[in-house]
Image (tube, rainbow, N blue to C red):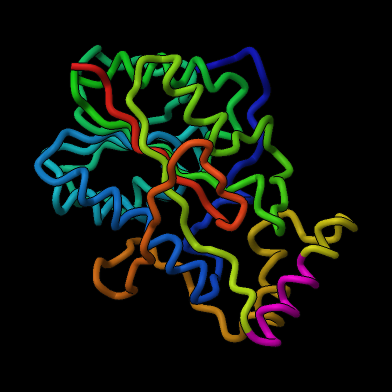
Amino acid sequence: MNTQHDVPDYSTITEAPDTRASADQMQILHTRYGLAAKYAAGKEVLEVACGAGVGLGMLARVSRRLVAGDIDERNCAIARETYRNNPQIEVRHLDAEEMPLPAASFDLVILFEALYYLHSADAFFQHAKRVLRPGGTLLIFSVNCRWGGFNPSPFSTRYYDAPEMADALARHGFQVSVYGGFPEQTDGFIPKTISAIRKVAVSLHVIPQTQQSKEWLKRIFYGRLKQIPRELQAGTVAPAALEALKPPYAAGLYRFICAVATAAL
Protein backbone atom coordinates (compact mmCIF):
# COMPACT_ATOMS: atom_id res chain seq x y z
CA MET A 1 0.00 0.00 0.00
CA ASN A 2 1.18 3.50 -0.76
CA THR A 3 2.10 5.18 2.51
CA GLN A 4 3.48 8.35 0.96
CA HIS A 5 0.13 10.15 1.15
CA ASP A 6 -2.94 10.00 3.35
CA VAL A 7 -5.93 8.16 1.96
CA PRO A 8 -9.14 10.24 2.01
CA ASP A 9 -12.45 8.68 3.01
CA TYR A 10 -13.48 7.76 -0.51
CA SER A 11 -16.52 5.89 0.82
CA THR A 12 -18.27 9.26 1.24
CA ILE A 13 -18.21 9.89 -2.53
CA THR A 14 -18.67 6.32 -3.73
CA GLU A 15 -21.82 5.18 -5.51
CA ALA A 16 -22.66 2.63 -2.84
CA PRO A 17 -25.76 0.66 -1.81
CA ASP A 18 -26.58 3.12 0.99
CA THR A 19 -27.06 5.99 -1.50
CA ARG A 20 -29.83 6.82 -3.96
CA ALA A 21 -29.43 7.83 -7.56
CA SER A 22 -31.40 9.48 -10.35
CA ALA A 23 -32.45 7.55 -13.45
CA ASP A 24 -29.69 9.41 -15.31
CA GLN A 25 -27.07 8.31 -12.80
CA MET A 26 -28.24 4.71 -13.00
CA GLN A 27 -27.94 4.77 -16.78
CA ILE A 28 -24.38 6.05 -16.47
CA LEU A 29 -23.52 3.12 -14.19
CA HIS A 30 -25.07 0.62 -16.59
CA THR A 31 -23.30 2.22 -19.55
CA ARG A 32 -19.90 1.85 -17.89
CA TYR A 33 -20.35 -1.75 -16.85
CA GLY A 34 -22.25 -2.76 -19.96
CA LEU A 35 -19.27 -1.61 -22.02
CA ALA A 36 -16.82 -3.34 -19.67
CA ALA A 37 -18.78 -6.59 -19.86
CA LYS A 38 -18.36 -6.66 -23.65
CA TYR A 39 -14.59 -6.50 -23.29
CA ALA A 40 -14.58 -8.90 -20.31
CA ALA A 41 -16.28 -11.84 -22.04
CA GLY A 42 -14.11 -14.92 -21.53
CA LYS A 43 -11.20 -12.82 -20.20
CA GLU A 44 -9.19 -12.47 -17.00
CA VAL A 45 -10.20 -9.08 -15.62
CA LEU A 46 -8.88 -6.61 -13.05
CA GLU A 47 -11.03 -3.70 -11.89
CA VAL A 48 -8.97 -1.08 -10.08
CA ALA A 49 -10.71 1.39 -7.74
CA CYS A 50 -13.82 -0.80 -7.81
CA GLY A 51 -15.52 1.20 -5.05
CA ALA A 52 -18.34 -0.74 -3.38
CA GLY A 53 -18.28 -3.22 -6.25
CA VAL A 54 -21.78 -2.68 -7.63
CA GLY A 55 -20.67 -3.70 -11.14
CA LEU A 56 -18.63 -6.77 -10.24
CA GLY A 57 -21.52 -9.18 -10.65
CA MET A 58 -22.06 -8.07 -14.25
CA LEU A 59 -18.38 -8.65 -14.99
CA ALA A 60 -18.18 -11.97 -13.17
CA ARG A 61 -21.05 -13.45 -15.19
CA VAL A 62 -19.10 -13.11 -18.44
CA SER A 63 -15.41 -13.16 -17.44
CA ARG A 64 -13.16 -16.17 -16.87
CA ARG A 65 -11.61 -14.63 -13.75
CA LEU A 66 -12.22 -11.39 -11.88
CA VAL A 67 -10.00 -9.56 -9.39
CA ALA A 68 -11.14 -6.22 -7.99
CA GLY A 69 -9.58 -3.81 -5.56
CA ASP A 70 -9.97 -0.44 -3.91
CA ILE A 71 -7.70 1.68 -1.73
CA ASP A 72 -10.57 2.36 0.70
CA GLU A 73 -11.06 -0.63 2.99
CA ARG A 74 -14.65 0.45 3.72
CA ASN A 75 -15.49 -0.01 0.07
CA CYS A 76 -13.69 -3.36 -0.04
CA ALA A 77 -15.71 -4.56 2.96
CA ILE A 78 -19.00 -3.78 1.19
CA ALA A 79 -17.87 -5.57 -1.97
CA ARG A 80 -16.68 -8.62 -0.02
CA GLU A 81 -19.98 -8.85 1.83
CA THR A 82 -21.99 -8.58 -1.39
CA TYR A 83 -20.05 -11.34 -3.17
CA ARG A 84 -19.12 -13.50 -0.19
CA ASN A 85 -20.79 -16.51 -1.84
CA ASN A 86 -19.27 -15.93 -5.27
CA PRO A 87 -15.90 -17.68 -5.47
CA GLN A 88 -15.23 -16.17 -8.90
CA ILE A 89 -14.82 -12.66 -7.45
CA GLU A 90 -11.66 -11.83 -5.51
CA VAL A 91 -11.69 -8.46 -3.72
CA ARG A 92 -8.36 -7.01 -2.57
CA HIS A 93 -7.22 -3.91 -0.72
CA LEU A 94 -5.36 -2.37 -3.65
CA ASP A 95 -3.51 0.85 -4.46
CA ALA A 96 -3.73 1.75 -8.16
CA GLU A 97 -0.25 3.27 -8.05
CA GLU A 98 1.45 0.24 -6.45
CA MET A 99 -0.25 -2.91 -7.72
CA PRO A 100 1.54 -6.02 -6.36
CA LEU A 101 0.24 -8.28 -9.12
CA PRO A 102 2.13 -10.59 -11.49
CA ALA A 103 3.15 -9.30 -14.89
CA ALA A 104 1.07 -10.29 -17.92
CA SER A 105 -1.68 -11.76 -15.75
CA PHE A 106 -4.80 -9.99 -17.10
CA ASP A 107 -6.51 -9.40 -20.43
CA LEU A 108 -8.54 -6.38 -19.29
CA VAL A 109 -7.86 -3.65 -16.71
CA ILE A 110 -10.70 -1.30 -15.77
CA LEU A 111 -10.53 2.10 -14.09
CA PHE A 112 -13.85 3.94 -13.74
CA GLU A 113 -14.12 7.47 -12.36
CA ALA A 114 -10.86 7.30 -10.44
CA LEU A 115 -8.02 8.56 -12.66
CA TYR A 116 -8.40 12.06 -11.24
CA TYR A 117 -7.85 10.83 -7.66
CA LEU A 118 -4.41 9.41 -8.36
CA HIS A 119 -1.29 11.25 -7.29
CA SER A 120 0.55 9.73 -10.24
CA ALA A 121 -1.49 8.64 -13.24
CA ASP A 122 1.80 7.65 -14.88
CA ALA A 123 2.45 5.13 -12.11
CA PHE A 124 -0.95 3.57 -12.73
CA PHE A 125 -0.41 3.45 -16.50
CA GLN A 126 2.94 1.73 -15.96
CA HIS A 127 1.42 -0.90 -13.67
CA ALA A 128 -1.59 -1.40 -15.94
CA LYS A 129 0.69 -2.04 -18.91
CA ARG A 130 2.85 -4.39 -16.84
CA VAL A 131 -0.05 -6.57 -15.63
CA LEU A 132 -1.73 -6.68 -19.05
CA ARG A 133 -0.92 -9.40 -21.52
CA PRO A 134 0.21 -8.32 -25.00
CA GLY A 135 -2.86 -7.08 -26.87
CA GLY A 136 -4.76 -6.60 -23.60
CA THR A 137 -7.11 -3.69 -23.02
CA LEU A 138 -7.14 -0.82 -20.53
CA LEU A 139 -10.61 0.70 -20.20
CA ILE A 140 -10.96 4.15 -18.59
CA PHE A 141 -14.16 6.11 -18.00
CA SER A 142 -13.96 9.64 -16.58
CA VAL A 143 -16.02 12.78 -16.15
CA ASN A 144 -15.12 15.35 -18.79
CA CYS A 145 -13.44 18.39 -17.26
CA ARG A 146 -14.19 20.37 -20.45
CA TRP A 147 -17.96 19.95 -20.01
CA GLY A 148 -19.67 23.20 -19.07
CA GLY A 149 -21.33 21.69 -15.99
CA PHE A 150 -18.17 20.02 -14.68
CA ASN A 151 -17.77 20.06 -10.90
CA PRO A 152 -14.51 18.69 -9.43
CA SER A 153 -14.52 16.11 -6.65
CA PRO A 154 -13.18 17.30 -3.27
CA PHE A 155 -10.49 14.56 -3.34
CA SER A 156 -9.34 15.04 -6.93
CA THR A 157 -5.70 15.71 -7.78
CA ARG A 158 -5.77 16.28 -11.54
CA TYR A 159 -8.33 15.91 -14.31
CA TYR A 160 -7.39 14.84 -17.83
CA ASP A 161 -9.35 16.08 -20.81
CA ALA A 162 -9.67 13.84 -23.86
CA PRO A 163 -6.45 14.97 -25.67
CA GLU A 164 -4.40 14.79 -22.45
CA MET A 165 -5.65 11.30 -21.65
CA ALA A 166 -4.96 10.07 -25.18
CA ASP A 167 -1.46 11.59 -25.15
CA ALA A 168 -0.61 10.13 -21.74
CA LEU A 169 -1.71 6.64 -22.77
CA ALA A 170 0.19 6.88 -26.06
CA ARG A 171 3.36 7.82 -24.17
CA HIS A 172 3.04 4.55 -22.28
CA GLY A 173 2.83 2.55 -25.48
CA PHE A 174 -0.93 2.10 -25.79
CA GLN A 175 -2.96 2.43 -28.96
CA VAL A 176 -5.90 4.62 -27.97
CA SER A 177 -9.48 5.13 -29.09
CA VAL A 178 -11.49 7.89 -27.40
CA TYR A 179 -15.26 8.12 -27.03
CA GLY A 180 -17.68 10.73 -25.76
CA GLY A 181 -20.78 9.90 -23.78
CA PHE A 182 -23.89 11.59 -22.44
CA PRO A 183 -24.01 14.81 -24.45
CA GLU A 184 -25.54 17.69 -22.53
CA GLN A 185 -29.22 18.07 -23.32
CA THR A 186 -30.02 21.67 -24.29
CA ASP A 187 -33.31 21.19 -26.15
CA GLY A 188 -36.40 22.34 -24.27
CA PHE A 189 -37.03 24.71 -21.41
CA ILE A 190 -36.42 22.27 -18.54
CA PRO A 191 -33.03 20.89 -19.76
CA LYS A 192 -31.83 24.42 -20.49
CA THR A 193 -32.93 25.61 -17.07
CA ILE A 194 -31.28 22.71 -15.24
CA SER A 195 -28.06 23.24 -17.21
CA ALA A 196 -28.01 26.96 -16.43
CA ILE A 197 -28.69 26.43 -12.72
CA ARG A 198 -26.00 23.77 -12.48
CA LYS A 199 -23.41 26.05 -14.07
CA VAL A 200 -24.27 28.82 -11.61
CA ALA A 201 -24.08 26.40 -8.68
CA VAL A 202 -20.68 25.14 -9.85
CA SER A 203 -19.34 28.68 -10.22
CA LEU A 204 -20.55 29.55 -6.70
CA HIS A 205 -19.13 26.31 -5.24
CA VAL A 206 -22.44 25.39 -3.61
CA ILE A 207 -22.86 21.83 -4.94
CA PRO A 208 -22.68 19.34 -2.01
CA GLN A 209 -19.59 17.15 -1.84
CA THR A 210 -20.73 13.71 -0.63
CA GLN A 211 -23.09 11.27 -2.33
CA GLN A 212 -25.63 11.43 0.48
CA SER A 213 -25.63 15.22 0.72
CA LYS A 214 -26.29 15.47 -3.03
CA GLU A 215 -29.53 13.50 -2.77
CA TRP A 216 -31.75 16.46 -1.92
CA LEU A 217 -30.41 18.36 -4.94
CA LYS A 218 -31.02 15.40 -7.24
CA ARG A 219 -34.60 15.09 -6.02
CA ILE A 220 -35.28 18.73 -6.88
CA PHE A 221 -34.00 18.45 -10.46
CA TYR A 222 -34.54 14.79 -11.33
CA GLY A 223 -37.48 13.72 -9.21
CA ARG A 224 -37.76 10.41 -7.42
CA LEU A 225 -34.50 8.59 -6.71
CA LYS A 226 -33.81 4.86 -6.61
CA GLN A 227 -31.62 2.97 -4.19
CA ILE A 228 -28.35 1.89 -5.81
CA PRO A 229 -28.36 -1.92 -5.66
CA ARG A 230 -25.54 -3.95 -4.20
CA GLU A 231 -25.22 -5.61 -7.60
CA LEU A 232 -26.24 -4.16 -10.96
CA GLN A 233 -28.36 -6.46 -13.08
CA ALA A 234 -27.70 -6.45 -16.81
CA GLY A 235 -30.73 -5.56 -18.89
CA THR A 236 -32.59 -3.59 -16.23
CA VAL A 237 -31.43 -0.21 -17.59
CA ALA A 238 -30.60 0.45 -21.24
CA PRO A 239 -27.02 1.72 -21.63
CA ALA A 240 -26.38 4.90 -23.59
CA ALA A 241 -24.47 4.96 -26.85
CA LEU A 242 -20.93 6.30 -26.94
CA GLU A 243 -19.62 8.30 -29.90
CA ALA A 244 -16.16 7.70 -31.33
CA LEU A 245 -14.07 10.87 -31.34
CA LYS A 246 -11.18 11.78 -33.62
CA PRO A 247 -8.17 14.00 -32.87
CA PRO A 248 -8.11 16.69 -31.59
CA TYR A 249 -10.93 15.08 -29.55
CA ALA A 250 -13.18 18.11 -29.23
CA ALA A 251 -15.30 16.62 -26.45
CA GLY A 252 -16.71 19.70 -24.73
CA LEU A 253 -20.27 18.64 -25.56
CA TYR A 254 -19.99 15.37 -23.65
CA ARG A 255 -20.30 14.88 -19.91
CA PHE A 256 -18.02 11.84 -19.94
CA ILE A 257 -15.07 10.57 -21.89
CA CYS A 258 -13.96 7.00 -22.36
CA ALA A 259 -10.57 5.68 -23.47
CA VAL A 260 -10.07 2.18 -24.83
CA ALA A 261 -6.32 1.55 -24.84
CA THR A 262 -4.68 -1.54 -26.29
CA ALA A 263 -1.30 -2.81 -25.13
CA ALA A 264 1.22 -3.55 -27.87
CA LEU A 265 1.48 -7.14 -29.08
Q: Residue at x 25, y 21 (%)?
A: 132
Judge from the rendering whether residue 74 lies leftward or rightward of residue 34; answer left or right.
right
Q: Residue at x 54, y 33 (%)?
A: 163
Q: Residue at x 66, y 47 (%)?
A: 146
Residue 197: in magenta span: yes
Q: Residue at x 50, y 24 (%)?
A: 167
Judge from the rendering whether residue 38 lies leftward or rightward of residue 189; answer left or right.
left
Q: How many marks?
A: 0
Determine the residue located farthest toward the right in the rendered image: 204
Image position, residue 72 (x, y; %): 53, 36
Q: Is residue 188 above or below residue 52?
A: below
Q: Is residue 196 above or below residue 255?
A: below
Image position, residue 148 (x, y; %): 71, 56
Q: Is residue 263 above or below residue 177?
A: above
Quadrant of res 170 = top left
Image position, residue 143 (x, y; %): 57, 48
Judge from the rendering whether residue 157 lies leftward or rightward of residue 227; answer left or right.
right
Q: Which residues are magenta?
A: 188-198
Judge from the rendering whether residue 47 lies leftward or rightward of residue 115; answer left or right.
left
Q: Which quarter of the rendering shows the C terminus?
A: top left
* Magenta portion: prevailing SS class: helix
Foreground of the two, 242 or 211: 242
Image position, residue 123 (x, y; %): 49, 15
Quadrant of res 202 = bottom right
Residue 196: in magenta span: yes
Foreground of the two, 146 or 30: 146
Foreground of the two, 167 or 157: 167
